[in-house]
Image (cartoon, helix red, strand yellow):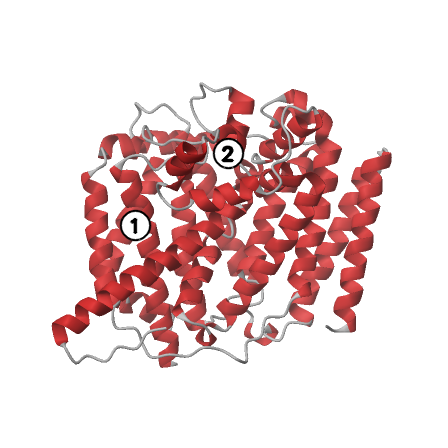
Amino acid sequence: MRLQQIGYILYLLINSIVIYLFYVLQPSWGDTVSFILFSLTLIYFLLSLYKFNPNRNQKIVWLTPSNFLLLGLIIVNLQTLLNVYFNYGTLDFYLEAASNESMKDTVLYFSIIGFNFYFIGLESFKFDINKGHRNRKLTTISLWGYLTAIVFIYFLMNIDLISFMTGMTYRGSGAYDRIREDSEFAENLLNVFFTIYISIYAYNHFLDKRTVNFKAFIKEIPLIFWIPFLLYVLLRALSGDRGPVIYNILLLFFAYFMVVQPKIKLLYVLSGLFFGASLVTIMGIARGLATDKSVGAKFSEAIEMSSDSKPSIFPATQELGNSINCNFIAVTDIEEEKTHYRYGANTLFNIISAVPGTYSITRKMLDIDPVQFSTSEYLTVSLFGAQYRFGLGMSAFSEFYLDGGLLGIVCGFFFLGVLYKFVDTVVLNPSRYSIYVIIFVLKLASICVYLPRSSMGYGIGKALYGVIIYYILNHLFILFIRRKNGNIIYYTD
């Protein structure tokens, strides 16, 4: 570890101690100094990306998953607080429950401490890329394409298109843990197959060491993938469910990033993020409108309403910033002793819930109350009551805080930093790793923007689920091919 890194980590630790003293002493100027300290830390981090990054000449230092994750964390945890600080509105204007506004300082101070440990996690580990794993091209990709198409057809056969497109079938409260119907199971599996297929494609491509542009990258992916993928993303966009749209687009982006290592200017990146954030906001507003309206009418009304949304330093991302409600509820309920720390049970439960069916099985076998061990369920019931009409969702901060308070924040954000340092390493050096690692990393990369308003545990669980599905089905494919051809020699990881 370089002396510069050690000094940076020491600064972050001292910074965290100072912020914690603000939490204890509650000075009237604490929020001002906290924002200044965070700004200085962020500026240094961004400058170090270019100055100390070995890839700076490739102009790709801004495009790593950890930076997208950082942006999402800032929006979710700080944007609303910045709105209040710069007098865009009072805190109760932005919160679902105005009674929670007394926890503003706690949420602010603990968020900034969390950011410090996220940066520490990014700086503390350097993953070895010299001793990598190389292998032959994978020849089962066509079978994965056929399987993806079959599952997509099964998915279409089990949904009511009208209800689906109008948003009537959308269910909140982190609906990931509610795999009850055939269509929901098929959709879950379909997203896994999208990740596996594009991972195999990218893996085979960078083993070829061929240089391609964006157009060639798109053309080389066969229609058996594009048709289900594009139709699914379109259907989900029309339904108003932003999560699948965001992470499937990012899945393609980071696969392209792995293969091509493009030189994209920061201005283009910021423009794309602004457009994407605006589109996501409009989709979120459209989802909340009356379900008896046509899709076109809902989106037209949503575009008009987006211009009249809550005042903000950056209106395009305020809808995402509203997820800070989850942070306030978690802190308030712990402070007022409405609930207790889970000591990691929330994160573990979210990892388990990523596998379809395990939620129901675990609940029945262990007689578990989902309100106590599902973060999204708990936050929704805490705010709306047991008879809620739609879910509140959750945030990574709320997951960590309910698991262990400030210690949960420190450990959770630190682990996020370490995890996404590994993700960055693989994305920048993909040919050094096996297909299992590529699947795991591409899934985590695809959810980097959405994870701050979701669950780290669930993200890890989905990535592991994809690896397990690939391992099982790929070995079945190999057996099938060998029996069919007899003397085939197949290379696998």
Point out the image quarter for the N terminus.
Answer: bottom right
- In the image, taking residue 342 as reference, residue 9 lies left or right, namely right
Q: Give the vertical position of 151 relative to 145 (above or below).
A: above
**Residue 237's quadrant in the figure?**
top left
Residue 234: tell me if it is visible.
no
Q: Residue at x 72, y 52 (%)?
A: 116
Q: Are marks 2 and 1 in contact (CB under 8 Å)?
A: no
Q: Nearer the viewer, residue 467 or 36?
A: 467
Q: Give the vertical position of 104 relative to 475 (above or below).
A: above
Identify residue for label 1. 190
SS under mark 1: helix
**Residue 200's quadrant in the figure?**
bottom left
**Distance CA(mark 2)–CA(mark 1):** 23 Å
User: In this view, which residue lies farthest toward the front?
Assistant: 365
Q: Give, as a three-letter code, the residue at label 2.
A: Ser
Q: Residue at x 70, y 36 (%)?
A: 107
Residue 19: tell me if it is visible.
yes
**Residue 169 at x, y percent in the picture:** 32, 30
Q: Residues within 10 Å of mark 1 (few under 14, many from 20)?
A: many
Of the two numbered discs 2 and 1 on the same chain, state the one appearing first in sequence. 1
Q: Give, as a three-letter code, the residue at label 1.
A: Leu
**Residue 293 at x, y percent in the picture:** 31, 25
SS under mark 2: helix
**Residue 166 at x, y percent in the picture:** 30, 31
Point out the image quarter for the C terminus.
Answer: bottom left
Task: Please tell me the numbered disc located at residue 376.
Answer: 2
- In the image, taking residue 310 as reference, residue 227 lies left or right, namely left
Q: Residues within 10 Å of mark 2 (few under 14, many from 20)?
A: many
